Amino acid sequence: MTDAEEYIAVREEITVEGFFKATFYVNDVLEIFFDHSVEIVETIHLQKIQEVAGKLGGGKKLNLLFHMHEFLHTSPEGSKFATSEEGVRFSNMIAVIVDNLPKRILMNFFVTFHKPKVPTRGVKSKKDAFDWFLKYK
């Protein structure tokens, strides 16, 4: 399978109502789209993501790709959980789509201040995320 095929080949899709939609790719990337009803990412949201990642990945660590809609931010408790051992239990690497300056500033602040336990990066596009994941495969 080529890199391009892995980029589009979907293993499974799941929706957790009121939380997020997830697409699981054959290259062990889990793409997360937060529900638009979520304005603040709380610990419960991140726990559910880790639960889904653990089930879909059979307990192994996955690369996570997050899409954050406008004005979405993480609570202080959510940020603390996101960078804890439990919060990255099934996370290998984390990429977050930052498609505008405010998101980029928030992402840079998050990475600098909270110091994630796994490689975490803001990227401009899905392709950039997949390229970054493949570089360290």
Image: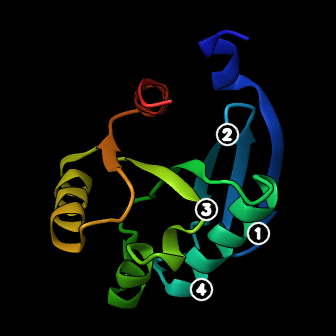
Q: Amino acid at mark 4?
A: Ile
Which residue position is annotated with label 1? 16
The answer for how far apart the CA atoms under marks 2 and 3 are is 11 Å
Q: Amino acid at mark 1?
A: Val
Q: Residue at x 46, y 77 (%)?
A: 39
Q: Is residue 99 left or right of residue 16?
A: left
Q: Is residue 132 visible?
A: yes
Q: N-terminal of the two: label 1 or label 4?
A: 1
Q: Position of residue 34 (x, y in %)?
A: 57, 63
Circle 2 SS class: loop
**Which numbered disc, 1 or 2, marks the residue closer to the eye?**
2
Q: Residue at x 76, y 25 (%)?
A: 9
The answer for how far apart the CA atoms under marks 1 and 4 are is 12 Å
Which residue position is annotated with label 2? 28
Neighbour tally class for label 3: few under 14, some 14-19, many 20 plus, Cα within 10 Å: many
Q: Is residue 116 left or right of residue 112?
A: right
The answer for how far apart the CA atoms under marks 4 and 3 are is 15 Å
Q: Position of residue 43 (x, y in %)?
A: 51, 85
Which residue position is annotated with label 3? 90
The outermost residue toward the bottom is 77
Q: Amino acid at mark 3?
A: Phe
Circle 3 SS class: loop
The answer for how far apart the CA atoms under marks 1 and 3 are is 18 Å
